[in-house]
Image (cartoon, rainbow, N blue to C red):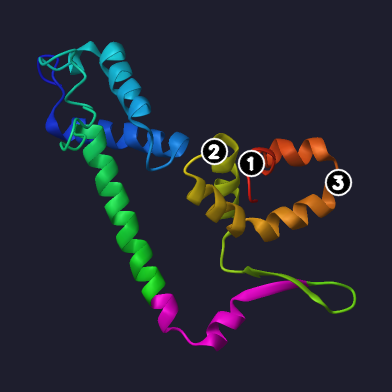
Amino acid sequence: MDEGLLSHKYRIQAVRMFVSHLIEQFGDRPTSHVKEALARSIVNEFPKLKGEDGDGYEAWYTSSIGQHAATGYLEERLRNVRKRTAKKNHVSIRKANKTNSDSTASSVSSLESDEGQLLLTFPDDIEPAAIEAMVQWMKHNKEPLGKVREYHQKTAKSRLMWIRENPEGVAIFAKYPRLLDTSGL
């Protein structure tokens, strides 16, 4: 920092850190109120980051007005993260569609009843650390609903095995609170 100003390099790092926290807590599409509250908090906690226009937080986030899209450091970073995520998901889907059914069948496990009847089918390629990260994310987030449902589906096998070992309802709902408040799960 020179003369109390944040250099371009450090501003980029700060924006990445703030947006990472924002996504962790609210998903990649937080409401405009959440983004504005974060922008206001940034300039309240770090007055040197206050802009000269308006209330001083507008450089960090300005909500959309009419046909003009929302802008600011936080919004631009969120757009870039969403764009990168969409591209990665698009490539993954395309690659998955190219694989043959044998490779798909080999990466899937199923739980069977004692009679050999198929009950559920789950993907096997999810790392335990990724499952735990999804479970932790779901503890703190109700939105975006699509992401909650996706994580709920991806953690189904792990959750089922854990529930079989821990029959107490209180413990189950403490670890998986979205089972109580998300319809359709």
Task: Residue under label 1, please give it.
Answer: 178
Q: Is residue 66 left or right of residue 143?
A: left
Query: Is the C-beta separation of discs 2 and 1 under 8 Å?
Result: yes
Residue 100 among magenta residues: yes
Q: Residue at x 29, y 17 (%)?
A: 40
Marks 2 and 1, the one that precedes in the sequence: 2
Neighbours of disc 2 within 10 Å: few (<14), some (14-19), many (20+):
some
Q: Amino acid at mark 3?
A: Pro
Q: Secondary structure at mark 2?
A: loop
Task: Residue under label 2, please give it.
Answer: 142
Instruction: Say if 73 sits above or below 150 in the image.
Output: above
Residue 116 disc label? none
Q: Amino acid at mark 1?
A: Arg
Q: Secondary structure at mark 3?
A: loop
Q: Quadrant of residue 36?
A: top left
Q: Nearer the viewer, residue 79 or 21?
A: 79
Q: Is residue 11 left or right of residue 152?
A: left
The quadrant of the rendering that contains the N terminus is top left
Q: Residue at x 31, y 50 (%)?
A: 82
Q: Position of residue 3 (x, y in %)?
A: 10, 14
Q: CA distance from mark 2 to mark 3?
A: 24 Å
2 or 3: mark nearer the eye:
2
Q: CA distance from mark 2 to mark 1?
A: 7 Å
Q: CA distance from mark 1 to mark 3?
A: 17 Å
Q: Residue furthest front?
A: 66
Neighbours of disc 3 within 10 Å: few (<14), some (14-19), many (20+):
few
Magenta residues (range): 95-111
Task: Residue under label 3, please give it.
Answer: 167
Q: Residue at x 16, y 38 (%)?
A: 67
Residue 3 among magenta residues: no
Q: Position of residue 76 (x, y in %)?
A: 21, 40
